[in-house]
Amino acid sequence: MTKGQAPISAAGWNFDNSYARLPELFFTRLNPAPVSSPKVIILNEPLATSLGLDIQALQSNDGAAVLAGNQIPEGALPLAEAYAGHQFGHFTMLGDGRALLLGEQITPRGERVDIQLKGSGRTPYSRRGDGRAALGPMLREYIISEAMHALGIATTRSLAVVTTGESVIRETGQPGAILTRVAASHLRVGTFQYVSKWGTPQDLRALADYTLQRHFPEVDGDENRYLVLLQEVIKRQAALIAKWQLVGFIHGVMNTDNMALSGETIDYGPCAFMDAYDPATVFSSIDLHGRYAYGNQPNIAAWNLARFAETLLPLLHVGEAQAVELAEDAISDFAELYHRNWLAGMRAKLGIFNEELQDESLIEDLLGMMQKYHADYTNTFRALTFDQPEDTVLIGTTEFAQWHELWQARLGRQEESKASSHQLMRSSNPAVIPRNHRVEAALEAAVQPGDYSVMEQLLEVLASPYAHSPEQADYSALPEPSQCPYRTFCGT
C-alpha cells in the first residue's frame, strides 16, 4: 500500500490521491452534487475487471450511487482540477467545470489510473455551465473512446454511464447522465499553462516533477529532466497524432486543454471519423474556419506543444536565451517524428515492410486519387487489403490502373511474401470504424425510446476492428447520400 492509499473496498476500489498532495492552487476539493435516481445503463465489464473492481458490486444500487456521485467510495478524495488553455487560439482560464476526480485507482497490476466522474455537478470552474451532462454525448464518448482503444490508439477509457433520473436543459430538455472516465492522468498542456500564469516557480517545478514521476519515471536524475519531459511529451504526441491520421479520426477541438501529457486521446466532444478522404474535412459545428480540420491536426499539435514548451522555459535553463534555444530545438523535432510515424503506418497499410525513397510519392498519389474521386478512406484501404479494387470508386480510372501496377511492383521488390503483406495490411487497416451514421443511430435509439441494443451491437462490432469478419460487412457500408453535411457538437 503506497503512502496515503486507502484499504481496498468490497467493490474493489483501491484509491490513492497523489494529485491531491500537490499545492492547493492546482485544484478545489468538493463532492459531487447528488442526483435523484441513478441507474447504471452500461458497464465496461472487461475494463472493470482489469481495474480490480467487482462487476456485481458496480451494478448494484450502491454501485450506481458511487458512479453517480451520490456516495463517495472509501479512500476517494474528490476534487476539480484547475487548468487553462488556448481555445481556438485564444487563452482563457478553464478547469473541470462539470467533472470531478474521485482519486487514482491502483490496479491489481500496480498501475495508477484516474477515476473521474463527468457530469457530476457545478464546480468553481463551471463559469455559466450547469455542471451536468446529457445522455447522448456521454454515450458518444463511451462508444468512440472504446473504439479508439480497440483500434490500438492511446486513449482515455469509459468505465460506465449512469442516467441520473433528471433532465438537463440544452436546446431542449434531455436525459441527464454521468460518465465514469478512466485515464492515465488528466494532466494537460493547459495544466502547465495555468500554473505558469498564476503559480510560483516552485509550483511549476512541483508540477513538472509530479508529471515526470507519474508518466516518465525512467528519466535519469543526472539529465536535464525538464528538457527530457518536453522531449518525451513530443514523442508521444507525434505517435498519437500519426495514429489519428492513419484511421481518419478527427478530434474536432484540439485546444491546448485537450492535449494530455500522457499521450492519450482525451475529451471526445465534436469528434468523428472521416468517410470520403479530404484533408479539409471538418465536422465540428463551431470550427467555422477549419482550424482543427483533419489535415491541420499535425500542425495544431506542434502549435500546442510550443505552448507547452513556453511554460517550461524557467525550468529548462537559468538563461532565457539558452532556454528558448533548447525549447525550439525540441519542438523542431516534432515534424520529423510525426512524419516518420505516419510514413511507417502508411507503408504498413499498403503491405510494405522495408523502405524505398519513392514510397512517399506512391502514398501521396493514392491519397490524391482518393481525394479527387471522393473515395472512402477506410473502405479503400480495406479493398486493397483483400485485392478487391473493384470495390472502390477508383476502379476504371487510368490513374488507378497505373498506380496499382506500381504498387504491385513495389511489393514484388521486398523479401516478404504476398501472404505476409496481406497479413500486415489486415492488421493495419480496420474493417470497421465508428461510422457517423451508425453512431447517431445508436444514440437516437438509446436516448429517445431507451433502446440500448443498437449501441450494444455496435460496440460488439467495434471491439474487434481488425477481425474482418462477415458480421462486420454491414457496418462498413456508407450512409445514404445527404444534402446536409454531417455536423457534431461539443455536447456541453
Image: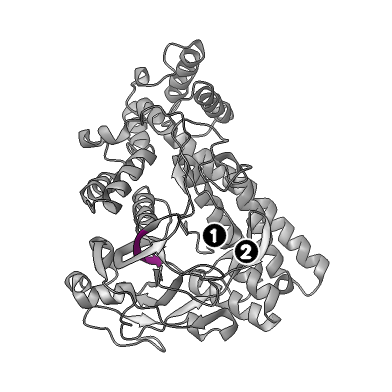
Residue carrying label 2: 85
C-alpha gap between disc 2 and disc 1: 8 Å
Tell me where residue 378 sits by quadrant. Answer: top left
Q: Nearer the viewer, residue 41 or 128?
A: 128
Q: Residue furthest front?
A: 172
Q: Could you tell me if the residues under marks 2 and 1 are in contact, i.e. CB atoms within 8 Å?
A: yes
- Residue 395 visible: yes
Q: Which residue is mark 1?
A: 258
* Mark drawn on residue 196: none
Q: Which residues are the magenta region?
A: 174-182
Horizontal and vertical percent for residue 257?
57, 63
Q: Tell me where residue 135 sits by quadrant.
A: bottom left
Which residue sits at x=31%, y=64%? 159
- How busy is the neighbourhood of tag 1: few (under 14 within 10 Å), some, or many (20 plus)? many
Q: Earlier in the sequence, mark 2 or mark 1?
A: 2
Q: What colouring method underlies this structural image? A: one colour
Q: Residue 353: horizontal and vertical position, in percent? A: 44, 35
Could you say where residue 262 lies in the image, as x and y percent from the top left? 50, 64
Q: Is residue 163 left or right of residue 207?
A: left
Residue 389 vertical position relative to residue 485 in the rendered view, above or below: above
Question: Does residue 107 show up?
Answer: no
- Residue type at mark 2 is Gly
- What is the three-letter code of the residue carrying label 1? Asn
Residue at 20 percent across and 75 percent down: it is 61
Front position in the image: 61 or 435: 61
Q: Quadrant of residue 478?
A: top left
